[in-house]
Amino acid sequence: MIITRTAFRRPATRVAPLLRSLCALAACLVLFQPNPARAAERDQIKAFLQVTGFDVALESIAQSASDAPAMLGADAGDFGLEWERLTQEVFAPDLMQTMALDILEDTLSSEALFHAAEFYASDLGQRLVVAENASHQNQDATAAREAGEQLISDLVENSDPRVALYRDMNTAIGGTDTSIRAVQEIQFRFLMAASAAGVIDMRIDADGLRALMKAQEGEMRRSMAASSLANSAYTYRDFSADEVAAYVDALEDPLMQEVYELLNAIQYEIQANRFEELAHRMRELQPVQDL
């Protein structure tokens, strides 16, 4: 399930997530029976998250905590040895998964849940989950992007149809504009929370901050579009053009669109919520600075 950044994992380590996904799939199919009980519905959704790989995407939100100090013009080292402890508490995987489950219980339709689970249970779907889970767990996004950029260069030189398909894939899962709006909202809420907590002394008001972000939008759009293309090339480098085309077709299905719209919204909301909490907690570590 593609949601955020892409990366890689060594092939030798891919057996465990594949087995985990298969076991989760079995649980999902057994649990997906008409049953009004709230607990059963929650179990279905939890299995669904594992089958589609969205549970790993949620865990990867914690990696974005490293971006927080840079938004304040600082470095993680400036916050002392407690920084790692704080981010582990704020971005605890169990906490974020519970938040997602709470929202999904009230919003995800059974029809959309089963449709997405069925696709990701296919042979192609399971291979995609392995590749995407690995991408979320990669710790060296810079190396992955550089390799992806080289792959794109090679694909363009050979007139490979996958370049256009990767662009179609990005559009199907939300597109660059959606990602930009989400990133801007996360940054805005984080900076406003940091200001309210006394972590920074902002010299501009909320309207000024939004205007500043708007002015930077063009550059951000170009950067994000290029990054998405490179990351897709690296993540799906072992998939043929026909397989990528089949994935794009699956992603463009109305029910899959429903799933992705919801999961994107949930991930961005959880990320913004956790960044706000991080801002409030940072006053324990850092004196007031000018921004």
Image (cartoon, grey):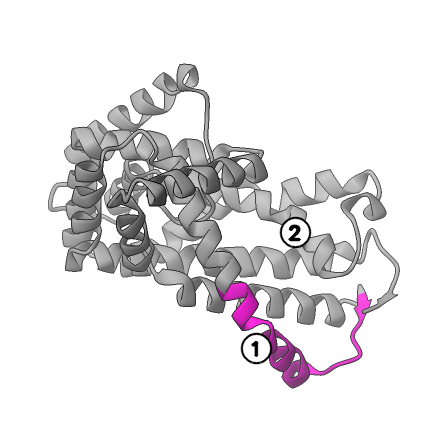
203 part of magenta stretch: yes
Look at label 2 and name its amino acid: Asp
Kindly report the secondary structure that dominates the magenta region of the rendered protein: helix
Q: Residue at x 66, y 78 (%)?
A: 209
> Which residue is more in the foreground, 83 or 99?
83
Whole-percent x, y for residue 132 in the image? 37, 36
Q: Residue at x 58, y 55 (%)?
A: 274
Range shown magenta = 200-221
Q: Residue at x 82, y 38 (%)?
A: 81
Look at label 1 and name its amino acid: Lys
The reply to whether residue 55 is in sight is no
The reply to whether residue 205 is in sight is yes
Whole-percent x, y for residue 75 in the image? 78, 49
Which residue sits furthest front? Answer: 157
Quadrant of the image containing the N terminus = top left
Whole-percent x, y for residue 173 in the image? 31, 55
**Residue matched to label 1:** 214
**Residue matched to label 2:** 67
Which residue sits furthest top? Answer: 12
Crowding at mark 1 (Cα within 10 Å: few <14, some 14-19, many 20+): few
Secondary structure, mark 1, is helix
First in residue order: circle 1 vs circle 2: 2
- Label 1 and label 2: CA atoms lie apart by 19 Å
> Which residue is more in the foreground, 235 or 162?
162
